[in-house]
Image (spheres, grey):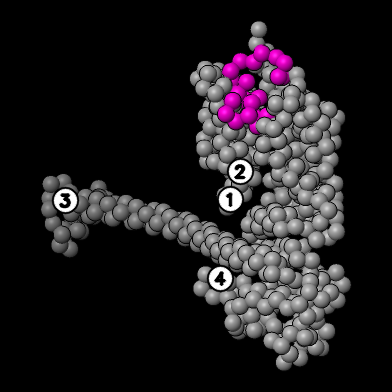
Amino acid sequence: MALDGTKAAEWIDAGRWTDLIREPLEAGHAALLHARLGELDAALEAADEAPEVGEEGAAARAAQGLVALARGDVEAALLCFDDAQARARAVGSVLGQARVALAAAEALLDRAGPVDGSAAVGRLAEARRFLEGTPEATPLKVELRRALAKARAMTGDLEGAVTEAATAEREAEALAADELRARCLATLAELEGQRGGDFVARKHELRAVELLEGLALALPADRREGFWREPLRRRLRLRASATTDRRRAEGTPGLDERLRRLFDVLKRVAREHELERLLERITDAAVDLTGAERGFVLLVGDDGQLEPRLVRAAATRADDPSVAFSRSIAEAVLIDGEPIVTVDARDDRRLSEYLSVHKLLLKSVACVPIRGRTSVRGVLYLEHRVRRGRFADEDLELLLAFADQAAIALENAELVAELESQRAALATANRELEDAKGEIERVLVARTSELEETREALDRARGDLRSRHARHGMIGRSEPMRRVFAVLDRV
């Protein structure tokens, strides 16, 4: 006899994989289990066998959504999740609706498009509403807290996000839900990385992989490969492998690791639309990618001159734009639009005439243009005053790719700021129009009332005239006749 659907869903929430694979499951929840274990083809086959309606139908559609998500088709996944939620609603499954709302919210948060954050918040609000009245410590509530942490990070509240994720991790540990705890640790690692806690982030990632390896080893050998194909698990495992790589331990990460770090950085940069925070992320990322001693973002001002907008260095304050740099090198890159990388700036013939190079005792310098759609927006300037040959050709390739994406992010941030300004101006204009409309309506009401009173007065006056000029069947308006009428009135 197949395991009850409600219990099967609870076990899937808790990641009880070894218990689940020993139990017969209905087709819908079997599809969901296959999807969560990374067995995508098997998940689709089981989903095709599931009924169209009921809890099994909802589980099957949710499984199809997870498969689409694993294959990178977020839009198809969201459509499947919407359908699954409708099917769960049709049978009154509140927890089923909460599960699908959380899955959709996570897909939106991971995609991190311009409107995905607000859409994800809406899904999370739905999930919170569905989970009201359930016990405090359940896997679904922990999953909700983890997703809320990611949503808070998208709004810029990194401190609050880290606190939320840490609480979720502790709750998952109390539930002995290792799969869920690993996911919480992965989120915590991502957030710590965003706020600069690289060492803490790596520690969380390694602990997450340790938990996942324990789960994988408990599975039959033929099911472990699929387990590690699930996107989050695969990403964590790759990061852990890179962390233990000998080149990384020596402080010289290989190209694959550097590319991975570049992709992670670009993802964080693409999420940021507030200019100052964006500049911080660009500079921090450039310093981290290259191992530079100091990094500068210099943007072209209204007067056409380069202005230091942000500095990152171990020996200077992060927000101090007055730190000396070789303006000659930066301006040369701005004018020519070509990058400069030097092994030893003082011995480089291209830079021999630049007094700032000798004055600052520079050794390694890398400077690349930040090219916008129509012009060079500024430059990314990196230096090391102690180490000779700090920047290599592969650093230049990474920096050029990064600078191009940084230019796109800067232009997007400006567009977002412009749209926000226009929205605020439009809202102000709408309020003024509403106020003017109210004033016009008030004046019209007053004028209408005055006109009505005038009309009534005219009607009374006409009545008086008619009654006075046509009395007792006699018609006359001359003075003698008026005297006659007056006598009659007195009588």
What is the spatial separation of the Cα atoms under label 3 and label 4, in whole angstroms?
91 Å
Which residue is the site of mark 4? 372
| Front-lying residue, 117 or 269 | 269
Q: Disc 1 or 2, which lies upstream in sequence? A: 2
Q: Report crowding for label 3: few under 14, some 14 to 19, many 20 or more residues within 10 A (C-alpha).
A: few
Counting other residues with Cα less than 10 Å from the Cα at mark 1, is it few (<14), some (14-19), or many (20 or more)?
Answer: few
Mark 3 and mark 1: span between their CA atoms? 85 Å
Q: Position of residue 416 (x, y in %)?
A: 57, 61
The percent coordinates of residue 179 (x first, y second) are 76, 32
Label 4: how many residues lie within 10 Å, few (<14), some (14-19) or many (20+)? some
Q: Where residue 449 appears, x then y in whole percent?
A: 39, 53
Report how far apart the C-alphas of labels 4 and 1 lie in the structure.
21 Å
Q: State the SS at label 4.
A: loop
Are the two marked residues, 1 and 2, in contact with CB atoms closer than 8 angstroms? Answer: yes
Task: Compare marks 3 and 1 and give the one earlier in the sequence.
Answer: 1
Q: CA distance from mark 1 to mark 2?
A: 8 Å
**In terms of sequence position, does the residue under pointer 3 or pointer 4 come before the other?**
4
Instruction: State the mark number for residue 113.
Output: 1
Whether residue 140 appears in this view of the structure is no
Chief SS of the magenta region: helix
Residue depth check, mark 4 versus mark 1: number of the one nearer the observer = 4
Q: Judging from the image, what secondary structure is the residue with disc 3 in?
A: strand
Q: Amino acid at mark 4?
A: Gly
In space, the residues marked 4 and 2 are separated at their CA atoms by: 28 Å
* Quarter-of-image position of residue 176: top right
- The magenta span reads 20-42
Q: Which residue is mark 2?
A: 108
